[in-house]
Image (cartoon, grey):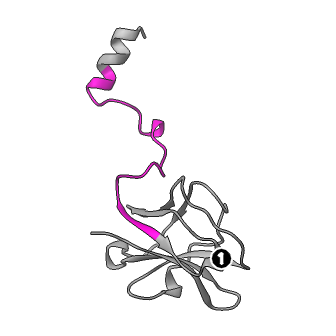
Amino acid sequence: MNRRSFMSLTAGGLVAASAVPIFAGGHGRLGTFTGAARYGISGTAEVAGDQVNLLDDFRFGNAPDPKVALGRDGYDASTLMGLLKNTSGASSYTIPAGIDPSQYNEVWIWCEQYNVPLGMAKLGG
């Protein structure tokens, strides 16, 4: 493939989907984390399709057993997606089957061991 044909493919929108990271942002509902300062949570969460994405600006200080979940005006344990994969930077989590993400307006980082909230991102529109 020469440069001209590549340029025409990209201009026509035929770029392979795998060329775009799943947690690039801008394709779903976004929210900014807030929480107790002692846990050091900051950054952006996104819900896009069946994924929760923590974007490149995500930071988490320290606390035991941090897990990712959804909530609707409060944490919902049935939406737990597992242990936080990274304490900084982008990561992605699959929403459990049978959960409709449009029914939730928050992304939570939750300490399941002690049943306490570590941080929450309120999702926009």
Q: Is residue 24 left or right of residue 28?
A: right
18 within the magenta span:
yes
Estimate the x, y position of residue 59 in percent, counting from the top left. Answer: 61, 63
As shown in the figure, which amino acid type bears the numbered disc 1?
Tyr
Using the image, determine if residue 55 lies above or below residue 32.
above
Q: Is residue 46 left or right of residue 78?
A: left
The residue drawn where x is 26% and y is 26% is 12
Segment colored magenta: 9-32
Q: Quadrant of residue 115?
A: bottom right
Residue 48 inside the magenta-drawn segment: no
* Residue 72 location, quadrant: bottom left
Question: Does residue 51 appear in the picture of this structure?
Answer: no
Q: Secondary structure at mark 1?
A: helix
Seen from the viewer's position, the closer of residues 51 and 89 is 89
Residue at the disc numbered 1: 39
Q: Is residue 13 visible?
A: yes
Point 66% across, 79% down: residue: 38
* Residue 87, position as x, y percentages in the image: 67, 63
Q: How many marks?
A: 1
Q: x and y percent of residue 90 in the render?
A: 57, 54
Quarter holding residue 124: bottom left
